[in-house]
Image: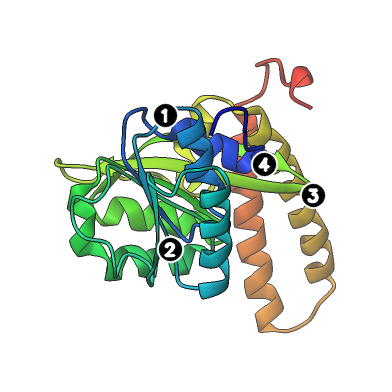
Amino acid sequence: MAGKHVQLSRRLKAIADMVTEGNRLVDVGCDHGYLPVYLMLNHKIPGALATDVGKGPLARAQEHIAEYGMSKYIEARLCDGLQGVRTGEGDTLVIAGMGGPLMEKILTEGKAALPGFRELILQPQSDIPHFRHFLMEHGFCIIQEEMILEDGKYYPMMKAVSDRTPGEIWTREEEMFGKLLLERLHPVLYKYLQRELRIREEISGQLKNAAGEGAKKRLDEVEEEKRLILAALQRYEGKGTDRLA
């Protein structure tokens, strides 16, 4: 609708920027429906399917879609993950703002719908290293990564495409922090690594004074995590990290 605009959070704006222009969008777990409305208002997509498993969030999304005069272009559909999405209904699949294990479940249970998508834009909130590994294990290639710091929280996100060739294998360090973020020496990742190192050092200090086999096992894990964080931070050495701090 002319004269109207949607103000997205930095997290959602970064996701919107990843969407290929001209693609039809399927937004799973659309919440308020701001992402498809924003993309329509900016003439980046021709149409969208916004789904949610909750009747409340879907009703709010429908209200926003109608408020911006987009009901003709954005369909709001009540369904669980990809269960109610047919193959070929969209080109770009967005799943954002959920835990990694839930997103893995949605992709696994909805695998019949996946071949129709040209790209997946994914923003898991937890278990990120495992989620990256899951994608590559299931025949996807991560071609773009971004990381946003907003309101004190770090949001890694990625674009993946179906990989016709044998899946790429990333190192543990690359799975933990994002191979493409490391290659770019991403400034937000640098801040994240510094924070994670501080956290591990605090935990390590506490565990060194604790007794028992469980504490020793956890200390070994934390020390290994510290080693990986320090290895990642070393990549930034001499690369103008004074500008990143």
Q: Position of residue 208 (x, y in %)?
A: 80, 68
Image disc number at residue 103: 2
Q: Compared to 231, does 109 lie above or below? A: below
Q: Which residue occupies the foreground of this view, 102 or 203?
A: 102
- Distance (Cα) linking label 4 and label 3: 28 Å
Asked if the residues shown at circle 1 and circle 2 are in contact, with their CB atoms under 8 angstroms apart, the answer is no
User: Of label 2 and label 3, which has the lower sequence position?
Assistant: 2
Q: Residue at left 45%, top 69%?
A: 102
Is residue 95 at least partly visible in the picture? yes
Instruction: Look at the numbered disc 3 and give the secondary structure of its residue.
Output: helix
Q: Position of residue 128 (x, y in %)?
A: 51, 55
Q: Amino acid at mark 3?
A: Arg
Q: Which residue occupies the foreground of this view, 230 or 99?
A: 99
- Distance (Cα) linking label 1 and label 4: 18 Å
Is residue 31 at least partly visible in the picture? no
Q: Residue at left 25%, top 56%?
A: 138
User: Of label 1 and label 2, which has the lower sequence position?
Assistant: 1
Q: Which residue occupies the foreground of this view, 62 or 103?
A: 62
Q: Amino acid at mark 1?
A: Lys
- Residue hosting label 4: 9
Instruction: Look at the numbered disc 1 and give the secondary structure of its residue.
Output: loop
- Distance (Cα) linking label 1 and label 3: 41 Å
Instruction: Look at the numbered disc 2 and give the secondary structure of its residue.
Output: helix
- Residue hosting label 1: 44
- Residue hosting label 3: 198
Q: Residue at left 78%, top 70%?
A: 207
- Distance (Cα) linking label 2 and label 3: 29 Å
Q: Nearer the observer, disc 4 or disc 2?
A: 4
- Distance (Cα) linking label 1 and label 2: 25 Å
Q: Compared to 110, does 118 lie above or below? A: above
Q: Amino acid at mark 4?
A: Ser
